[in-house]
């Protein structure tokens, strides 16, 4: 079983920034891809952004130009910095990783609230 622990959520004003971190119980070289998803009440979970083992990235249209990935191989952590946050970015954010030979795993989620 692979554990994913998210951190970095919280309350931020519109236009502000947050850096979400996802710490894995396996080395990052064992992860094929890791993504951040978000969900609001009554809606399906949607992809925000993901990074592949190769380093290539994919961003939802809503996050293009506002997100940056960071990887720390010593801490087995992938972070997503989100800038110019808007109230519509408010959601529970989940980290999900596809681990080679093991499949997909999810974290417990972290709340992001963008409000003045």
Image: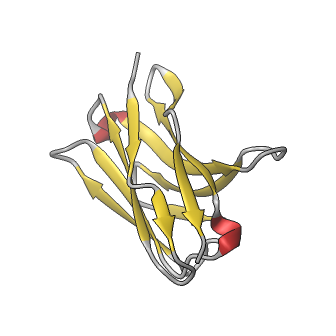
Q: Residue furthest left?
A: 74
> Which residue sits at x=15%, y=45%?
74
Q: Quadrant of residue 113?
A: bottom right
Quadrant (top left/top right/bottom left/bottom right) for the N terminus:
top left
> Which residue sits at x=45%, y=40%?
32
**Is 7 left, or right, of 98 in this rendering?**
left
Q: Residue furthest front?
A: 116
> Which residue sits at x=67%, y=72%?
87
Quadrant (top left/top right/bottom left/bottom right) for the C terminus:
bottom right
Q: Position of residue 42 (x, y in %)?
A: 84, 44
Rendered view: 112 above or below 107: below
Q: Residue furthest top?
A: 1
Q: Position of residue 67 (x, y in %)?
A: 49, 72
> Which residue sits at x=40%, y=48%?
53
**Is 105 left, or right, of 89 in this rendering?**
left
Rendered view: 60 above or below 37: below
Q: Position of residue 48 (x, y in %)?
A: 62, 58
């Amino acid at each position: 079983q692979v554990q994913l622990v998210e951190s970095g959520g919280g309350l931020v004003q519109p236009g502000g920034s947050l850096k979400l971190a996802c710490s894995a119980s396996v080395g990052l070289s064992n992860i094929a891809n890791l993504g951040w998803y978000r969900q609001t009440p009554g809606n399906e979970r949607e992809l925000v952004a993901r990074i592949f083992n190769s380093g290539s990235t994919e961003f939802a249209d809503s996050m293009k130009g506002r997100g940056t990935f960071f990887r720390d191989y010593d801490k087995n952590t992938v972070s997503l910095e989100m800038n110019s946050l808007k109230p519509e970015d408010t959601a529970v954010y989940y980290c999900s990783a596809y681990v080679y030979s093991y499949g997909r795993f999810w974290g417990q989620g972290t709340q992001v609230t963008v409000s003045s």
